[in-house]
Image: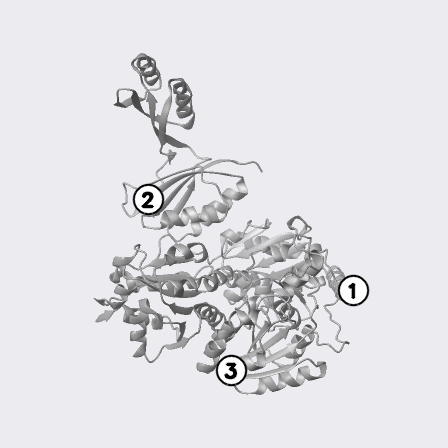
Amino acid sequence: MKLKGAEILIKMIKDQGVDTIFGYPGGAVIDIYDALDHTTDLRHILVRHEQGAVHAADAYSRAKGTVGVALVTSGPGATNTVTGIASAYMDSIPIVVFTGQVPTALIGNDAFQEVDIVGITRPCTKHNYLVKDITKLARTIKEAFHIAKSGRPGPVLVDLPKDIMAATVEFEDPGDIDLKSYKPTYNPNMKQITKVVELIKSAKRPVIFSGGGVVLSKASEELTKLARMTNSPVTASLMGLGTFPGSDPLWLGMLGMHGTYRANMSISHCDLMIAVGVRFDDRVTGRKDKFASEAKIVQIDIDPTSIHKNVEATCPIVGDCKNTLEILNSMLESENPSDISGNPQERQTWLDQISQWRATSPQRYDQTTTVIKPQYVIDRLHKLTDKNTIITTEVGQNQMWTAQYYHFERPNHFITSGGLGVMGFGLPAAIGAKAACPDKLVVCVAGDGSIQMNSQELMTAIEANLPVKIVILNNRYLGMVRQWQELFYDKRYSFTNMEMSPDFVKLAEAYGATGMRTDKVDQVEAVLKKGLACEGTVIMEFIVDREECVYPMVPAGGAISEMILV
Amino acid sequence: MSSQKYILSILVDNEPGVLSRIAGLFSGRGYNIESLSVAQTAENSALSRITMVTIGDDHIIEQITKQLHKLINVITVNDLTEKQYVHRELMLIKVNAKPEQRAEILRIVDIFRCRVVDVGHEHYIIEVSGDEGKLEALIDLLRPVGIIETARTGLIALTREKRIKIK
C-alpha cells in the first residue's frame, strides 16, 4: 500500500488509539492538514496558540490516561510549544508533539520559518527525533509513542520536514518496538520488598507519601489498600492529590510549602516514610536536613535517577508503583494483620498526636468580612460539585487554594502544572480534559493574572463545543508574588499590582461565552450554581479580598516543621 | 564527600545529536567534563564509544551515571575508576627547535620513548602517548626550549579483564 508521509503520520496516530489531536496549521504542515481534511475518525481541535495545543494534549492525556498529541508548524509554531513541552516533562506526562520542519534540502540554511526545534527541546523532552528518511517514518512515530508512555512517561517530539510529509512510500508496519538501550524496570527487587515488610512491622509512626507517579501508574487503589491495611496516615505532593481519598480519616492533606500543618508535622516526626512515585521536589522537602530526619525512608519509583537525588532513601525500590504496591500488599496480606498495623496503643498515640496537630492548626480562613475570601469560593465549588468533576488550575495562589480546599477523591481529576508552574495552563488544559471526558464537568480555577496568559483559547472552547467553566479569583494582583513581597520584601509590590484588567464578563461575551461577576459573599453560591448549570462555556468572576495570603506557608529553604500559620 | 576524577566509558548510538544530548545533560545539570573523546567503534559501526573524564563526589557520579543511562541513545555506561583498566592519551606538541636546541630535544624524546613526526627549519612536532603524568612531565621538560602549541586527544581507556559487552 502506497501512502504519503502525511497519511502514514495520521494512520500511526490513530493506531495508538488516539481519537483527538490539538493543533494549528502552517506552511510546513500543510500536507498533513491536507490529509486531515479527508480523515474522518481523528478529531482535530483548532487552538488559537500553539502553547494551548500542548497544554490541551497534556490534560487530555491525564484525564484519559493515554497519550496526548499536538501538531504544529515549523519555526514559531514549534517554538511556541516549548513551554507546554517543558511542563509535560517536569510532570512526566506522556505526549507526542509533531512539529513541521522546512524541507530536508533547506535544513540548516536559515530558511523561512526554520528553527532547530530538536536542538531547542533536547533538554525538555524525554526523547526527540528529526525524520530525514520516509522509510523510517512509521517506525519513528511508533517509537515516539512507546517512549512517551513507557517507564517514567514524558513528552517526545518528532520533527517532520515538509518534503517527507509530501513524499510517497510503500507502507510497512514497523512491528513491535524493542529498543536495546531502553528497558524500564517495571518489576521490583523482591528482597527490597521483604525489607519493607519488616520496616512496616517495626514502625511506630508510619506515614505514606504519595506523588504523581501513583497517578501515572494507576496505583491509587493499591496505595489506598496499603494505607488502610497498615493503618498509616497518607499525605501527597501537589501532583499526588486525588491518589488517596480526601474524605478518608487517614488523609493528612497536602505536604510541603503550602501543605497542612499536620502533614508537615507528621513527616517531620514519623519513623517510617513510604514514598511512592515522588521525586522530593524542593517545594515538598524545604530544608533537606530537617526533612523526615527521624524516619527510615522507603522510596518506590520507576526512575532510578529519582532515587538518592534529593533525599537519601533507606530502602530504595526501582519499579512500577502499581506492580510494586501489588506485590507488597500481597506479602502484607500473608502476615498477621495485627503485626502490620502496629501496636494498637502506639498507633493510637501516633494518630492522636496527628489529630492534635490538626486541632492546633487546622486549615482555615475567616469569611466574616463582607469581602469574598478566595478560599470560600473554592470551598463552595467543592460542595457544589461531585468527585467526578475535573478541576484544572492556573498557577499561583489560585492553584494552592484549590489544592488546599478542594478535597480530591479520585486520581486524574486534578490537573495542574506542578513542576514547571505554567501560568496560562488552566484554560487550555480544561479544554483538553473536556475533549477527553465530554461527559464530565470541567472547571478551570484561575487568577486574574494567569487567565490572561492564554485567554484566546476561549475561542477554541466555543468553536469546538467543549464547554468549560472558568472560575476567576480576581484580586487585581499577581497574588503569589505579591504575597512573597508582603512577607519577605517589605511590601514593595513591584509590578504585581494589576489594577488594570479587562472586563472579564465582556471578554466572555466577546467570544460568545457567558460572563458573570460578583463581589458579594452571599452571591458566591448563587453565581457558582448558575454558572455550573448553564450550558456552554462560562466565566464566573469573583472579586476577592485583595491581600489574602496562602497559609500555612514554609518560607523557601526553611524546615517544613517551621510554618507560618494563619 | 570529596571530589575525585572518574573515568566513564559510554557506548552510544552512532547518530547525529547524541554527543549534544550528553553535553547538554552535563551543562544543564551543572556537571563537569574534564576531557572527552568520541569515535565509532571498530566492532560495530552503529556504535560510538565516548571516554569521559569527569569530576565529582560519589553522589554526583551516581546521578551522572543514572542520568546518562536514561538517555535513549546511551547503551552502556561503565565506570572504570574502580576497575582494572588501561588508559592512554595522545598529544602532539610543537616546540622551537633551533639547531643548537635539537640535540637536547632529541635526548628528551628518546628518554620519553616518543617521536618526532614533523621537522621544520625552526620547529619539531613531537608525538607522545601515555598517561597524564607522562604528558605533563614532557611538557615541563620542553617548556625551556619554547612550546609553540599543543593538541591533546583527551583520555581513552578500556577495561583489562574483559571487553565491555555489547548487547
Residue picked out by circle 1 = A360
- Label 3: which residue? A510
Give the residue at mark 2.
Answer: B48
Q: Quadrant of the N terminus of chain A?
A: bottom left
Q: Nearer the viewer, mark 2 or mark 3?
A: 3
Q: Secondary structure at mark 2?
A: strand
Pointer 2 chain: B
Secondary structure under tag 3 reads: helix
Q: Mark 3 against mark 1, which lies toward the viewer?
A: 3
User: Within the image, what quadrant is residue A491 found in?
Assistant: bottom right
Q: Are marks 2 and 3 on the same chain?
A: no
Compared across the picture, whether B167 is left or right of A231 comes to left
Q: Amino acid at mark 3?
A: Ala
Give left or right: position of A173 versus A263. Answer: left
| Residue that appears at 38% across and 31% down | B86
Residue at 34 percent across and 13 percent down: it is B104
Give coordinates of residue B3: x percent, y percent: 54, 36
Marks 1 and 2, how far apart in space?
A: 62 Å
Percent position (x, y) of residue A38?
29, 79
Crowding near the residue tagged with mark 3, few <14, some 14–19, many ≥20 C-alpha atoms within 10 Å: few
Q: CA distance from mark 3 to mark 1?
A: 48 Å
Can the viewer see residue A337 in this picture?
A: no
Q: Quadrant of residue A372?
A: bottom right
Q: Position of residue A439 (x, y in %)?
A: 50, 82
Amino acid type, callout 2 = Ser
Residue A306 image offset from top left, x and y in percent: 53, 53
Between A270 and A311, the residue placed more toward the observer is A311
Q: Quick one: label 2, few (<14), some, or many (20+) residues within 10 Å?
A: many
